[in-house]
Image (tube, coloured by chain):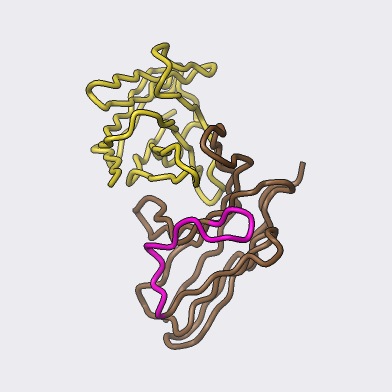
Amino acid sequence: EAGVAQSPRYKIIEKRQSVAFWCNPISGHATLYWYQQILGQGPKLLIQFQNNGVVDDSQLPKDRFSAERLKGVDSTLKIQPAKLEDSAVYLCASSLASGSWGTGELFFGEGSRLTVL
Amino acid sequence: AQTVTQSQPEMSVQEAETVTLSCTYDTSENNYYLFWYKQPPSRQMILVIRQEAYKQQNATENRFSVNFQKAAKSFSLKISDSQLGDTAMYFCAFMKQHTGNQFYFGTGTSLTVIP
Protein backbone atom coordinates (compact mmCIF):
# COMPACT_ATOMS: atom_id res chain seq x y z
CA GLU A 1 0.00 0.00 0.00
CA ALA A 2 1.41 3.37 -1.01
CA GLY A 3 1.91 5.80 1.86
CA VAL A 4 1.26 9.51 2.13
CA ALA A 5 3.28 11.31 -0.53
CA GLN A 6 4.60 14.84 -0.06
CA SER A 7 6.64 17.16 -2.22
CA PRO A 8 9.00 18.86 -2.27
CA ARG A 9 11.06 17.34 0.53
CA TYR A 10 13.13 20.47 0.93
CA LYS A 11 12.61 24.09 -0.04
CA ILE A 12 14.69 27.19 0.62
CA ILE A 13 13.21 30.60 -0.14
CA GLU A 14 13.75 34.24 0.70
CA LYS A 15 11.30 35.98 2.99
CA ARG A 16 8.31 37.50 1.21
CA GLN A 17 8.51 34.82 -1.50
CA SER A 18 5.81 32.23 -1.96
CA VAL A 19 5.93 28.44 -1.70
CA ALA A 20 3.52 25.58 -2.24
CA PHE A 21 3.51 22.08 -0.81
CA TRP A 22 1.66 19.13 -2.22
CA CYS A 23 0.24 16.08 -0.49
CA ASN A 24 -1.34 12.92 -1.83
CA PRO A 25 -2.97 10.90 0.96
CA ILE A 26 -3.42 7.15 1.13
CA SER A 27 -6.11 6.05 -1.27
CA GLY A 28 -9.52 6.05 0.34
CA HIS A 29 -8.58 8.19 3.32
CA ALA A 30 -11.30 10.74 3.88
CA THR A 31 -9.49 12.95 6.37
CA LEU A 32 -6.39 14.96 5.54
CA TYR A 33 -4.37 17.09 7.91
CA TRP A 34 -1.62 19.67 7.48
CA TYR A 35 0.64 20.17 10.48
CA GLN A 36 3.45 22.63 11.08
CA GLN A 37 6.35 21.26 13.13
CA ILE A 38 8.89 23.82 14.28
CA LEU A 39 12.22 22.40 15.41
CA GLY A 40 11.96 21.06 18.95
CA GLN A 41 8.19 21.30 19.10
CA GLY A 42 5.28 19.01 18.52
CA PRO A 43 3.14 19.17 15.39
CA LYS A 44 0.64 22.01 15.34
CA LEU A 45 -2.51 21.54 13.30
CA LEU A 46 -2.91 24.08 10.53
CA ILE A 47 -5.92 22.70 8.73
CA GLN A 48 -8.02 19.55 8.64
CA PHE A 49 -10.15 18.42 5.71
CA GLN A 50 -12.93 15.86 5.65
CA ASN A 51 -13.20 14.89 1.99
CA ASN A 52 -13.04 18.33 0.34
CA GLY A 53 -14.59 20.28 3.20
CA VAL A 54 -12.70 22.12 5.95
CA VAL A 55 -13.26 20.73 9.46
CA ASP A 56 -10.83 22.94 11.38
CA ASP A 57 -8.65 25.81 10.21
CA SER A 58 -8.68 27.81 13.42
CA GLN A 59 -4.87 27.89 13.67
CA LEU A 60 -4.17 28.63 10.02
CA PRO A 61 -2.71 32.16 9.57
CA LYS A 62 -5.17 33.01 6.86
CA ASP A 63 -3.47 36.26 5.91
CA ARG A 64 -0.58 34.27 4.42
CA PHE A 65 -1.49 30.58 4.43
CA SER A 66 -4.05 28.90 2.23
CA ALA A 67 -4.92 25.29 1.55
CA GLU A 68 -7.25 23.43 -0.70
CA ARG A 69 -8.28 19.87 -1.31
CA LEU A 70 -9.99 19.74 -4.62
CA LYS A 71 -12.00 16.60 -5.40
CA GLY A 72 -11.34 15.32 -1.88
CA VAL A 73 -8.05 13.66 -2.78
CA ASP A 74 -4.73 15.49 -2.93
CA SER A 75 -4.11 18.80 -1.26
CA THR A 76 -1.95 21.89 -1.64
CA LEU A 77 -0.72 24.19 1.13
CA LYS A 78 0.51 27.62 0.08
CA ILE A 79 2.39 30.32 1.94
CA GLN A 80 2.46 33.83 0.50
CA PRO A 81 4.37 35.86 1.55
CA ALA A 82 6.67 33.75 3.69
CA LYS A 83 8.15 35.01 6.95
CA LEU A 84 11.26 33.85 8.78
CA GLU A 85 9.11 32.21 11.46
CA ASP A 86 7.52 29.95 8.83
CA SER A 87 10.71 27.89 8.76
CA ALA A 88 9.50 24.45 9.80
CA VAL A 89 8.63 21.00 8.58
CA TYR A 90 5.17 20.80 7.07
CA LEU A 91 3.65 17.42 7.68
CA CYS A 92 0.73 15.97 5.83
CA ALA A 93 -1.23 13.15 7.40
CA SER A 94 -4.30 11.20 6.43
CA SER A 95 -6.77 9.04 8.25
CA LEU A 96 -9.31 6.49 7.14
CA ALA A 97 -11.62 7.52 9.93
CA SER A 98 -14.71 9.51 9.22
CA GLY A 99 -17.49 10.33 11.59
CA SER A 100 -17.26 9.99 15.32
CA TRP A 101 -16.24 6.40 15.81
CA GLY A 102 -13.26 5.79 13.63
CA THR A 103 -10.05 4.44 15.09
CA GLY A 104 -8.34 7.62 14.11
CA GLU A 105 -4.84 6.38 13.34
CA LEU A 106 -2.87 9.01 11.45
CA PHE A 107 -0.54 8.08 8.63
CA PHE A 108 2.13 10.70 8.04
CA GLY A 109 4.16 11.67 5.03
CA GLU A 110 7.89 12.35 5.28
CA GLY A 111 7.30 16.08 5.49
CA SER A 112 8.43 19.12 3.56
CA ARG A 113 11.21 21.08 5.23
CA LEU A 114 10.97 24.81 4.59
CA THR A 115 13.80 27.23 5.28
CA VAL A 116 13.03 30.93 4.96
CA LEU A 117 16.10 33.19 4.70
CA ALA B 1 -9.53 23.23 24.78
CA GLN B 2 -7.46 20.09 24.92
CA THR B 3 -3.82 20.21 26.02
CA VAL B 4 -1.17 17.50 26.06
CA THR B 5 1.89 17.86 28.26
CA GLN B 6 5.14 15.95 28.04
CA SER B 7 7.37 17.11 30.86
CA GLN B 8 10.52 15.23 29.81
CA PRO B 9 12.18 16.96 26.85
CA GLU B 10 15.04 14.45 26.76
CA MET B 11 15.66 10.99 28.15
CA SER B 12 18.25 8.29 27.72
CA VAL B 13 18.31 4.61 28.51
CA GLN B 14 20.85 1.83 28.27
CA GLU B 15 20.23 -0.78 25.65
CA ALA B 16 18.12 -3.68 26.99
CA GLU B 17 16.85 -1.59 29.91
CA THR B 18 13.35 -0.26 30.50
CA VAL B 19 12.29 3.37 30.22
CA THR B 20 9.03 5.18 30.89
CA LEU B 21 7.93 8.35 29.11
CA SER B 22 5.33 10.54 30.78
CA CYS B 23 2.30 12.29 29.34
CA THR B 24 -0.59 14.12 30.92
CA TYR B 25 -3.55 15.68 29.20
CA ASP B 26 -6.44 17.90 30.01
CA THR B 27 -9.91 17.46 28.60
CA SER B 28 -13.55 17.62 29.50
CA GLU B 29 -14.38 14.96 26.93
CA ASN B 30 -15.39 11.46 27.94
CA ASN B 31 -14.83 9.67 24.65
CA TYR B 32 -11.37 9.97 23.18
CA TYR B 33 -8.28 8.10 22.06
CA LEU B 34 -4.69 8.48 23.19
CA PHE B 35 -1.68 7.66 21.08
CA TRP B 36 2.08 7.47 21.21
CA TYR B 37 3.80 8.30 17.95
CA LYS B 38 7.48 7.76 17.17
CA GLN B 39 9.49 10.04 14.89
CA PRO B 40 12.97 8.64 14.13
CA PRO B 41 15.62 11.13 12.98
CA SER B 42 14.79 12.36 9.48
CA ARG B 43 12.08 9.79 9.09
CA GLN B 44 8.32 9.91 9.11
CA MET B 45 6.18 9.66 12.17
CA ILE B 46 4.64 6.27 12.88
CA LEU B 47 2.12 4.98 15.38
CA VAL B 48 3.52 3.06 18.33
CA ILE B 49 0.45 2.33 20.40
CA ARG B 50 -3.18 3.42 20.85
CA GLN B 51 -5.52 3.44 23.84
CA GLU B 52 -9.28 3.91 23.80
CA ALA B 53 -10.47 5.93 26.79
CA TYR B 54 -13.46 3.65 27.39
CA LYS B 55 -11.19 0.63 27.88
CA GLN B 56 -9.80 0.03 31.34
CA GLN B 57 -7.21 -2.47 30.18
CA ASN B 58 -3.86 -0.95 29.30
CA ALA B 59 -2.79 -1.40 25.69
CA THR B 60 0.32 -3.41 24.90
CA GLU B 61 2.20 -3.86 21.65
CA ASN B 62 5.19 -6.17 21.91
CA ARG B 63 7.84 -4.28 23.92
CA PHE B 64 5.62 -1.20 24.27
CA SER B 65 2.93 -0.79 26.89
CA VAL B 66 1.01 2.06 28.42
CA ASN B 67 -0.16 2.97 31.89
CA PHE B 68 -3.48 4.72 31.36
CA GLN B 69 -4.89 6.47 34.41
CA LYS B 70 -8.12 8.11 33.23
CA ALA B 71 -8.99 9.86 36.48
CA ALA B 72 -5.51 11.32 36.74
CA LYS B 73 -5.45 12.07 32.98
CA SER B 74 -2.12 10.35 32.69
CA PHE B 75 -0.85 8.22 29.82
CA SER B 76 2.72 6.97 30.12
CA LEU B 77 4.63 4.78 27.69
CA LYS B 78 6.89 1.99 28.86
CA ILE B 79 9.51 0.60 26.54
CA SER B 80 10.98 -2.69 27.66
CA ASP B 81 14.24 -4.22 26.43
CA SER B 82 15.20 -0.94 24.73
CA GLN B 83 16.85 -1.27 21.34
CA LEU B 84 19.04 1.15 19.40
CA GLY B 85 16.24 1.53 16.87
CA ASP B 86 14.03 3.00 19.58
CA THR B 87 16.08 6.20 19.46
CA ALA B 88 13.58 8.82 18.30
CA MET B 89 11.27 11.63 19.30
CA TYR B 90 8.15 10.31 20.97
CA PHE B 91 4.94 12.31 20.84
CA CYS B 92 1.90 11.76 22.96
CA ALA B 93 -1.32 12.63 21.17
CA PHE B 94 -4.97 13.04 22.09
CA MET B 95 -7.80 12.55 19.66
CA LYS B 96 -11.19 13.97 20.44
CA GLN B 97 -13.95 11.85 18.98
CA HIS B 98 -15.91 14.48 17.27
CA THR B 99 -17.18 14.76 13.74
CA GLY B 100 -13.68 15.62 12.67
CA ASN B 101 -11.45 13.41 14.85
CA GLN B 102 -9.24 16.31 15.92
CA PHE B 103 -5.73 15.51 17.13
CA TYR B 104 -3.62 17.37 19.68
CA PHE B 105 0.08 16.63 20.17
CA GLY B 106 2.49 17.13 23.05
CA THR B 107 5.89 18.76 22.59
CA GLY B 108 7.70 15.45 22.47
CA THR B 109 10.38 13.54 24.36
CA SER B 110 13.69 12.85 22.69
CA LEU B 111 14.79 9.34 23.64
CA THR B 112 18.33 8.13 23.12
CA VAL B 113 19.19 4.47 23.57
CA ILE B 114 22.81 4.09 24.60
CA PRO B 115 24.71 1.00 23.44
Left or right, residue A95 beside residue B101: right
Left or right, residue A39 beside residue B47: left
Q: Is residue B34 above or below residue A97?
A: above
Where does the image place residue B51, in percent across and percent down from the top left?
A: 45, 24
Left or right, residue B4 beside residue A29: left
The C terminus of chain B appears in which quarter of the rendering? top left
The quadrant where residue B54 appears: top left
Q: Which residue lies furthest to the top in this view?
A: B57
From the image, state the color of chain A.
brown
Q: Which residue is drawn at 55% across and 32% down?
A: A103
Q: Which residue is drawn at 56% across and 48% down?
A: B43
Where does the image place residue B114, in percent across and percent down from the top left?
A: 40, 30
What range is drawn magenta here? Answer: A49-63
Q: Indicate yes or no whether the magenta region holds residue B42.
A: no
Q: Which residue lies furthest to the bottom in this view?
A: A16
Where does the image place residue A84, in percent across and percent down from the top left?
A: 37, 78
Which chain is the one coloured yellow? B
Q: Which residue is drawn at 44% across and 81% down?
A: A82
Q: Indicate yes or no whether the magenta region holds residue A51.
A: yes
Q: Which residue is drawn at 54% across and 70% down?
A: A67
Counting every numbered tag in the picture gives 0
Q: Residue furthest right?
A: A1
Q: Is the magenta stretch mostly helix, strand or loop?
A: loop
Of B80 and B33, nearer the camera is: B33
Left or right, residue A6 beside residue A36: right
